[in-house]
């Protein structure tokens, strides 16, 4: 059992926090919206993010980061990618004062545009320079809506330290969520981040009226380009992409109505603008941010990522979806397996 600070009280943060309290841990949720903290404290609900659901009543929420981190042995980041660096800087200030050295866990799935850094790199840089062993990433096919209902779920927990991955496996596992350790931290993070871009593409295909063959082709070729980026730029192990954080997460995100990225893509495929979709989603659509980093990497490092590049052009260069599909299907013929 452990004292855990969960940073981010949106959908996934509040469900993971509640699950960790169900597991017998001492949990505090930290969030930046006062009305959400108040609702959690007074009613044990978080209705904007999670309808018809109650948190474990033993989970308090606070907007005071110092209070949330007091005595924490584990700090779980469940923030949108865009908020991780700024919150990490504030965490560092608090830890510098207290001298505490908690394990850092990231459930955030994204790559930071500009720096092109994974979340574990940001946490290492901002909190534990030169010691990535204190970082564990959890990633896999898991929607807050399913875990809230105690549906069966399997997730990878990855670290360069076997001991730390095992510690998180022990604290997080229960009889409905099973955690598997993995030593490929970057591979697990790349799978979780870039599948969000492919999920937008899967939604666009449905919005345009394409069928199951198109979806299967997209997921398979999507995995090929995720693997290419992971192995060639981040130094990931190819086998990781056959696991929970690779093909596993890609399956759930490209086929579930719970997926925000898929739902965003579907609306774009039906002709809505990106601005309209993001404004009305009310929750983070990570693929729309991560695709910028993926585009920068594909261009700079000459990594062949045709699906992600097409999504970038549709979202940010006003490209026409039908033209992009025509162009993609008409590319020079090539062998299937090419890293
Ligand atoms: N939902 C899910 O099922 C899963 C989500 N994830 C990942 O977890 C991460 C979080 O997702 P999710 O919980 O769904 O997102 P949500 O959009 O549901 O919630 C994110 C929360 O973080 C808040 N936030 C934004 N900036 C800050 C800040 N600077 N300080 C504190 N809080 C802040 C947001 O507030 P505001 O609305 O004001 O911006 C919002 O309340 C994402 O990377 C996602 O990909 C991973 C697996 C499953
Ligand atoms: O990462 C997630 C599921 O594993 C959540 O993102 P989506 O809601 O887009 O699927």
Image (tube, grey):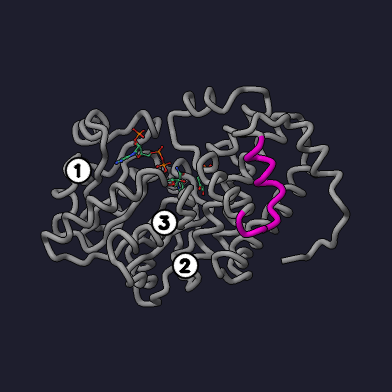
Q: Residue at x 81, y 40 (%)?
A: 327
The stretch drawn in magenta includes residue 312: yes
SS type, badge 2: helix
- Residue 60: mark in rendering: 1
- Outermost residue to the left: 97
Structural crowding at the residue carrying mark 2, measured as other residues with C-alpha within 10 Å and reported as few (<14), some (14–19) or many (≥20): many
Structural crowding at the residue carrying mark 1, measured as other residues with C-alpha within 10 Å and reported as few (<14), some (14–19) or many (≥20): many
Q: CA distance from mark 3 to mark 1?
A: 26 Å
Q: Is residue 76 above or below residue 163?
A: above
SS type, badge 1: loop
- Residue 185: mark in rendering: 2
Query: Which image quadrant: the C terminus?
Result: bottom right
Q: Position of residue 17 (x, y in %)?
A: 31, 49
Name the residue that disc number 3 marks. 119
Q: Is residue 182 left or right of residue 333?
A: left
Q: Is mark 3 within 8 Å of ligand 1?
A: no
Q: Main secondary structure of the magenta part?
A: helix
Instruction: Kindly check if marks 3 and 1 are in contact, taking CB atoms under 8 A apart as contact.
Output: no
Structural crowding at the residue carrying mark 3, measured as other residues with C-alpha within 10 Å and reported as few (<14), some (14–19) or many (≥20): many
């Amino acid at each position: 059992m452990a004292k855990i600070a969960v940073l981010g009280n949106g959908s996934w943060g509040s469900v993971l926090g509640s699950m960790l309290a169900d597991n017998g841990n001492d949990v505090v949720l930290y969030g930046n919206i006062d009305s959400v903290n108040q609702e959690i404290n007074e009613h044990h609900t978080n209705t904007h993010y999670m309808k018809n659901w109650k948190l474990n009543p033993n989970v308090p929420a606070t907007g005071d980061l110092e209070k949330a981190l007091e005595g924490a042995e584990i700090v779980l980041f469940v923030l949108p990618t865009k908020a991780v660096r700024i919150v990490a800087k504030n965490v560092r200030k608090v830890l510098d004062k207290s001298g505490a050295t908690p394990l850092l866990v990231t459930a955030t799935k994204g790559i930071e545009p500009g720096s092109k850094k994974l979340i574990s790199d940001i946490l290492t840089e901002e909190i534990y320079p030169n010691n990535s062993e204190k970082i564990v990433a959890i990633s896999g096919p898991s929607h807050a809506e399913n875990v809230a209902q105690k549906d069966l779920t399997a997730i990878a927990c990855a670290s360069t330290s076997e001991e730390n991955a095992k510690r998180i496996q022990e604290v997080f596992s229960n009889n409905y969520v099973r955690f598997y350790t993995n030593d490929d931290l970057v591979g697990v993070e790349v799978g979780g981040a870039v599948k969000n871009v492919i999920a937008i593409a899967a939604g666009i295909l449905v919005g345009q009226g394409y069928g199951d063959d198109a979806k299967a082709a997209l997921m398979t070729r999507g995995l090929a380009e995720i693997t290419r980026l992971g192995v060639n730029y981040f130094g990931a192990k190819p086998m990781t992409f056959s696991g929970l954080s690779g093909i596993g997460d890609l399956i759930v995100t490209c086929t579930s109505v719970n997926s925000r990225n898929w739902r965003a893509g579907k609306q774009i495929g039906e002709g809505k603008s990106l601005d309209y979709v993001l404004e009305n989603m009310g929750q983070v659509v990570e693929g729309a941010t991560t695709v910028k980093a993926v585009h920068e990497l594909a261009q700079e490092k000459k990594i062949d990522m045709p699906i992600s590049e097409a999504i970038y052009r549709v979202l940010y260069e006003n490209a026409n979806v039908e033209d992009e599909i025509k162009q993609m299907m008409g590319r020079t013929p090539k062998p299937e397996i090419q890293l």
